[in-house]
Image: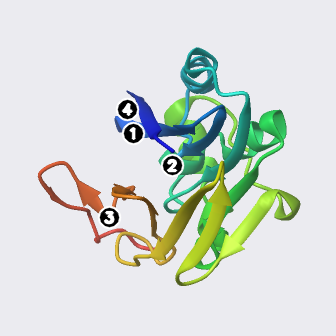
Amino acid sequence: MECVWLSTTSGPLETNTYLLKCNSEGVIVDPRAYIDDILRLVEKSSVRVVRYIVATHGHFDHVFYASTLSEYYNAAIVLHEDGFQLVHSQGEVSSRLYGEHYKPPQQHQLKLVREDVKLEFAGVELRILHTPGHAAGSICMLVGGLLFTGDTLFKGTIGRIDFPE
């Protein structure tokens, strides 16, 4: 089965949000602020079912609308267990930066993962790899030969590792 990925970038930190599409199913990766762009991306892609929302780490610019999208699509939020506290400590700074209210994910929305985990979606294997460094709960998602790295890698360089937890 062939999968395709689409992306949208915006916000003051120019955060990328990805949509992995396999047949009519999708996975949203790093749902940043400005939800309308994300909803349009899913709609234009003809994805009928969003299975997962993957947060490559818990910084606010990668999880800002995870909770809202989880409710909208009835999809689990995949997050490394070491990122749990971080997603719940981002409210003040993120709301100030984006001018919108940050709603952290609730326990029932989360699919907390550890180490090397395999998830299935649309007949495709998603490998979740724990890659601490940028944040304690950083993960990468491997789908065939495609790797979603979040801030573990930046274009042309390594990701930042100088943030306090």
- The answer to which of marks 4 and 2 sits earlier in the sequence is 4
Name the residue that disc number 3 marks.
152
Name the residue that disc number 2 marks.
62
- The answer to which of marks 1 and 3 sits earlier in the sequence is 1
For the residues labelled 4 and 3, the Cα–Cα distance comes to 19 Å
Q: Nearer the viewer, mark 4 or mark 1?
A: 1
Where does residue 116 sit, x and y in percent of width and height? 52, 81
Which image quadrant for residue 24?
top right
Q: Find numbered disc 3 in the image and state the secondary structure of the residue it sits on.
A: loop
For the residues labelled 2 and 3, the Cα–Cα distance comes to 12 Å
Does 64 sit above or below residue 85? Answer: above
What type is the residue that disc 4 sits on?
Answer: Pro
Q: Residue at x 52, y 47 (%)?
A: 30
What type is the residue that disc 2 sits on?
Answer: His
Name the residue that disc number 1 marks.
15
Q: Are marks 4 and 2 in contact (CB under 8 Å)?
A: no
For the residues labelled 1 and 3, the Cα–Cα distance comes to 13 Å
Name the residue that disc number 4 marks.
12
Which image quadrant for residue 95?
top right
Q: Nearer the viewer, mark 4 or mark 2?
A: 2
Where does residue 123 sit, x and y in percent of width and height? 64, 54
Task: Tell me the crowding category of disc 1: few under 14, some 14 to 19, or many 20 or more residues within 10 angstroms, Cα based.
Answer: some
